[in-house]
Image (cartoon, rainbow, N blue to C red):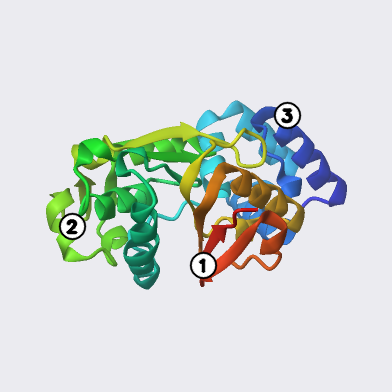
Amino acid sequence: MGNFNDYEIFKTRFYNISDIDLNLYKEKQMKRRITSLAEKHGHTTYCSFLEEMKRDSELYKLFINYLTINVSEFFRNPSQWKYFEKTVLTDVFKNKNLQDLKIWSSACSTGDEPYTIVMILNKYLPFERINILASDIDLEAIEKAKEGIYSTRSLKELPAEYKDKHFTKINDDSYQISEKVRKCVTFKQLNLLKDPYPRGMDIIVCRNVLIYFTEEAKNYIMKGFSESLRPNGVLFIGSTEQIMNYQSFNMKPIETFFYQKTEG
């Protein structure tokens, strides 16, 4: 599909209209994804695909959504959420006034991650004392998250206690999460490769996102997370990810997929 120059021009022009720098994503994976969608829409070059996106805002939205790899699944990898609840939260609770707890879901997609955190916290705190910050680059995904409607498949790992308490069945294949849970999350658009990060966080959750970035971009994000966390704050990453050079960011592993910021 297209040639080398065609893809280079596409990346530059796409950056001009979207502020998303595709050079910071792993090229092989990204090209494969873009080629698949472009060919599906009848294009043989990246630039002709971009021209159609400029004319068709629905296609552009579809592309952004496709690009940002939105996967909606509650309690993905349940054992990790168990560790999050039993160990990470317990440690944070010991050292922190609960009302001041600051948690950031940094690539929240369609909301399953921040809402999962709210449901876990609600076992220990009333809703009015829970406020999670959730951000994503994709506005379309954020709008879906605010609606809080999910397929039955998205809830397959969700323990019954959460499903029964916080969800209402809409039809055979969809459920809506309660307004009480939705009100606990503040959503905002944020590009991890460009925008300023919030500060003083106790916990940052960023699962299954770093794998799509180049090493340079990954290091930029990790530096940002380290600066965003307070000393002893915890970063929770995805099960397909690993941070080899954690010392460079004043981090130490406390369990697989969990890193703690050191005092340094």
Dot 1 or dot 3: first in sequence order is: 3
Would you say 215 lies left or right of 61 here? right
From this viewpoint, is residue 25 visible?
no
Q: Residue at x 17, y 50 (%)?
A: 166
Amino acid at the residue labelled 2: Lys
Mark toward the viewer: 2 or 1: 1
- Look at mark 1 in the image and give the residue it sits on: 257
> Is 233 located above or below residue 126 in the figure?
below
Q: Residue at x 26, y 34 (%)?
A: 183
- Look at mark 3 in the image and give the residue it sits on: 16
- On the image, the x and y values in percent for residue 238 come to 51, 63
Residue in the foreground of this view, choosing between 19 and 206: 206
- On the image, the x and y values in percent for residue 197 come to 58, 37
Q: Residue at x 60, y 38 (%)?
A: 191
Assess disc 3: are there few (<14), some (14-19) or many (≥20) residues with their C-alpha within 10 Å of its C-alpha. Answer: few
- Checking the image for residue 163, the label placed there is 2
Would you say 178 lies left or right of 248 here? left
- On the image, the x and y values in percent for residue 61 come to 52, 36
Amino acid at the residue labelled 3: Asn
Element type where label 1 sits in the image: loop
> Is 10 located above or below residue 249 in the figure?
above
Residue in the foreground of this view, choosing between 102 and 106: 102
Residue in the foreground of this view, choosing between 67 and 180: 180
Element type where label 3 sits in the image: helix
